[in-house]
């Protein structure tokens, strides 16, 4: 028996408690100061990337450096090296300034590092996530039998919906894959969908040509007649339709597809009905807006990203379905090394992932501390900010191409501003605000989306000022 003492734990990786406490306290202070600086500073990266690459090259991993020095270095580089989502003048893609309860959740998850694959390893986290999922499903009026799980993002959640649809469509899919179907598989969404659906088709093995991009109605919403025609055409050609995806809050324009009509067509055609509410699903929190999602409750499955408008840290998506057994069918596995294998409960038996982070705590802490009314007020505040932007732009002769009830404006400048993409490049390069160029119903527009819960009227005015500066050369 060897009773010699074991080597000490590696102090750089597992510091003693006093060192840990000192660094934690220092880090908390540094991060709060960085937050103040980044809110007031430029929205875009200002770092010299050539110098940064050279700096990285010079890292010698055979010569360890003190952690505090590295933490300070990392914060400084982050300060200058990213588009700042937490800056209140970021009117960008759906990346939020993260809410504080979700940030606290990340600290807690990082300390305990629970393994959420199995309910035996993590009974409390698994049950807590189930409770949050039930609360969201109830809010979405999906019925008491609805279930689901947390995913890394809208793309994973949407991918899950396609796997469920395929599993539901043919009992042979599980073992034979698409070879089980009598013809090529098809699924349908509007041409204004999030284009990750093409990657999803690829990953799922149905091929990118399985995705039919249905025409919109001139206002950015899926045209139900065009949808019916596409399905009929495909059936006549020997293809096998499996799923309709309606988007509740399109990425470019925040438009909500006709959810009731799409539900009716899915029912009539015997197809899986998925609603991609990755961003717009947050409207459920708002008593003023939730009516806009009527018809979503008829879905077989729904995607809602909490890391978009509900402002949790990334990535935190919710997948909901009324067909618990299909999740178990699509993701079942059997092995002796896992601490539990409770079909219908263990996340690794009901979702794409195996080892999993405690994602649901982010939404739990936000929802439990703010309540539905707090999340609703956050959503309503964003639309109030969008209204102020709209009012100011209209007064300056701009027009708004979309008529979304959500917090996104597709703005068109008056004559004399030159082309939209050059204008957006100028705004972004100024670092004073961040907006995106996109196309809405064939027209180039400036996409202005309210994603930050702390944007003030002064920030709105700063945005308007930079948008409305004419290029002197025009
Ligand atoms: C409507 C819609 N669906 C899906 C996604 C993809 O979500 P994620 O980036 O979380 O994977 C997005 C992202 O913006 C989206 O807007």
Image (tube, helix red, strand yellow):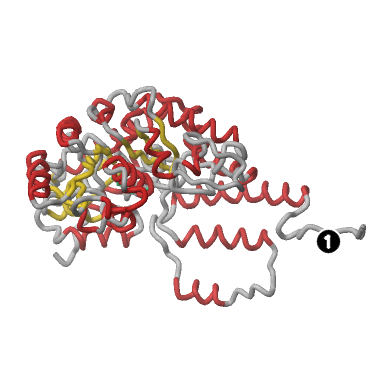
Q: To which quarter of the image does residue 329 belong? A: top left
**Looking at the image, which is closer to me, 312 or 303?**
303
State whether label 1 is within 8 Å of ligand 1: no
- Residue 369 position, x and y percent, is 50, 28
Q: Where is residue 341 in the image (x, y as percent from the top left)?
A: 55, 39
Q: Is residue 372 something that shows in the picture? A: yes
Q: The C terminus lies in which quarter of the figure?
A: bottom left
- Image position, residue 464 (x, y; %): 25, 47
Q: Is residue 222 above or below residue 379?
A: below
Residue 263: quadrant of the picture: top left
Q: What kind of element bears circle 1?
A: loop
Binning the other alpha carbons within 10 Å of mark 1 as few (below 14), some (14 to 19) or many (20 upward) gives few
The residue carrying mark 1 is 7
Quarter of the figure that contains the N terminus: bottom right
Determine whether, in the image, residue 403 is placed left or right of residue 334. left
Q: State the residue in front, 428 or 3.
A: 3
The relative height of residue 197 versus residue 118 in the rendered view (above or below) is below
Q: Can residue 450 be seen in this view?
A: no
Q: How many discs appear?
A: 1
Where is residue 344? Give x, y as percent.
47, 34
Decide if residue 7 is on the left or right side of residue 149.
right
Residue nearest the viewer, comparing 350 with 400: 350
Residue at 27 percent across and 39 percent down: it is 274
Q: Residue at x 18, y 64 (%)?
A: 472
Q: Which residue is drawn at 33% across and 42% down?
A: 164
């Amino acid at each position: 028996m060897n009773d010699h003492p074991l080597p000490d734990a590696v102090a750089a990786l597992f510091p003693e408690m006093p060192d840990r406490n000192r660094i934690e306290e220092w880090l908390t202070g540094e991060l709060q100061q960085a937050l103040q600086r980044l809110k007031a500073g430029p929205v875009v990266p200002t770092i010299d990337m050539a110098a940064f690459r050279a700096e990285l090259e010079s890292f010698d991993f055979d010569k360890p450096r003190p952690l505090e020095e590295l933490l300070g270095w990392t914060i400084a580089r982050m300060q200058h090296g990213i588009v700042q989502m937490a800056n209140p003048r970021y009117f960008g893609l759906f990346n939020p300034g993260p809410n504080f309860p979700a940030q606290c959740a990340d600290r807690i998850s990082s300390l305990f590092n629970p393994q959420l694959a199995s309910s035996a390893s993590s009974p409390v986290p698994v049950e807590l996530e189930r409770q949050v999922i039930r609360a969201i499903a109830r809010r979405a009026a999906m019925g008491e039998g609805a279930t689901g799980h947390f995913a890394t993002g809208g793309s994973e959640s949407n991918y899950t919906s396609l796997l469920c649809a395929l599993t539901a469509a043919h009992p042979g899919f599980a073992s034979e894959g698409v070879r089980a179907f009598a013809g090529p598989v098809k699924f349908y969404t509007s041409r204004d969908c999030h284009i990750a659906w093409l990657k999803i088709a690829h990953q799922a093995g149905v091929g990118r040509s399985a995705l039919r991009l249905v025409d919109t109605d001139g206002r950015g919403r899926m045209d139900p007649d065009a949808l019916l025609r596409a399905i009929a055409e495909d059936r006549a050609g020997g293809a096998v339709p499996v799923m309709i995806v309606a988007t509740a809050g399109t990425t470019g324009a925040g438009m909500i597809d006709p959810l009731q009509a799409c539900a009716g067509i899915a029912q009539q055609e015997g197809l899986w009905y998925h609603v991609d509410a990755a961003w717009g699903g947050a409207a459920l929190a708002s008593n003023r807006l939730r009516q806009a999602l009527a018809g979503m409750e008829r879905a077989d499955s729904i995607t809602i990203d909490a890391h978009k408008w509900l402002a949790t840290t990334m990535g935190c998506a919710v997948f909901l379905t009324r067909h618990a057994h299909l999740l178990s069918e699509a993701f079942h596995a059997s092995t002796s090394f896992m601490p539990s294998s409770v079909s219908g409960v263990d996340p690794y038996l009901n979702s794409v992932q195996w080892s999993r982070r405690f994602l649901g705590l982010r939404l739990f802490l936000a929802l439990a501390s703010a309540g539905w009314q707090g999340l609703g007020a956050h959503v309503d505040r964003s639309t109030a900010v969008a209204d102020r932007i709209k009012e100011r732009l209209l007064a300056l002769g701009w027009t708004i191409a979309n008529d979304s009830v959500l917090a996104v404006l597709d703005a068109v400048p008056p004559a004399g501003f030159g082309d939209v993409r050059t204008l957006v490049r100028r705004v972004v390069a100024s670092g004073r605000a961040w907006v995106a160029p996109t196309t809405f119903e064939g027209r180039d527009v400036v996409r202005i989306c309210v994603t930050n819960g702390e944007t003030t009227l002064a920030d709105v005015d700063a945005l308007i000022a930079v948008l409305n500066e004419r290029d002197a050369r025009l």
